[in-house]
Amino acid sequence: MRTWEVTALIFCILVLSACSSQDDFPIGNQIFRPPTIAVAPAPILTKIPAAPSPTTANTPIPISTPTPSCSNDLTFLEDITVPDGTSVSPGQEIDKRWLIRNSGSCNWNEEYRLQMIAGADFSLNPEQLLYPARSNTEAVINLFFTAPEENGTYSSAWQAFSPQGEPFGDTFFIHVVVSGAT
């Protein structure tokens, strides 16, 4: 027999043996036992995942989004009332108004403050609320001062502060001359 014939014969025997129910079969004067492949049984799931509870099934998963940063700025525009150097009487109530612009990108809310940073307190608490204003809008700051009882020149400087306690923007002033009977 030729090599290809032997190969073909072996092939046919192997194919026929696969269809046979016998485990062994003779090839020539030897018994041929085909190799067996051990097949592992399929794994059985012993733990079934629990269904989500009603409270967790409807709870949205929070998505972390970065807080957009904004910048604080205040631009002094003009004195509306009581121009610098105005004469006032001792103890007189002074209705001081400044026109300013929120020139930053942050909107001012109730957490923003005005603080006196220098000068006379004019019988006013040195920390006041800053008028709420949206970014890029004008606002009027209105404070009621009381002139000192003594004659003289008095000034007070004020500045805006962020909720984090950081000063920002232009400083604005009240500057008056107290004169008259004491």
Image: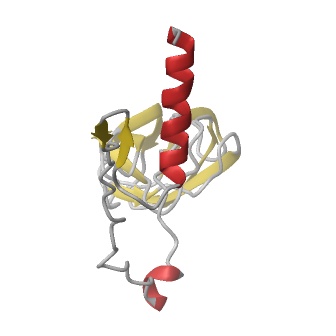
Compared across the picture, whether 108 is left or right of 164 comes to: right
Quarter-wise, where is residue 154 in the image? top left
Q: Quadrant of residue 8?
A: top right
Asked whether 117 or 68 is in front, the reply is: 68
Q: Locate the C terminus and report the quarter of the image it occupies.
A: bottom left
Q: Is there any visible trace of residue 76 in the rendered image?
A: yes
Rendering coords of residue 86 (x, y %): 54, 40
Scheme by which the image is coloured: secondary structure
Q: Is residue 46 left or right of residue 14?
A: left
Query: Residue 129's image quarter?
Result: bottom left
Instruction: Give the residue at the far right of this rendering.
Output: 137
Viewer-closest of 76 and 25: 25
Above or below, 109 relative to 71: below
- Total marks in image: 0
The residue at the point 56 percent across, 35 percent down is 12
**Residue most extreme to the front:** 29
Residue 41, horizontal then vertical, whole percent? 33, 65
Residue at 49% over, 78% down: 59
The image shows residue 19 at horizontal and vertical percentages of 54, 54
Q: Residue furthest bottom?
A: 54
Residue 123 drawn at (x, y percent)? 32, 60
24 and 136: which one is in front?
24
- Does residue 25 sit above or below 13 in this rendering? below
- Residue 70 in view, yes or no: no
Q: Is residue 150 left or right of residue 92?
A: left
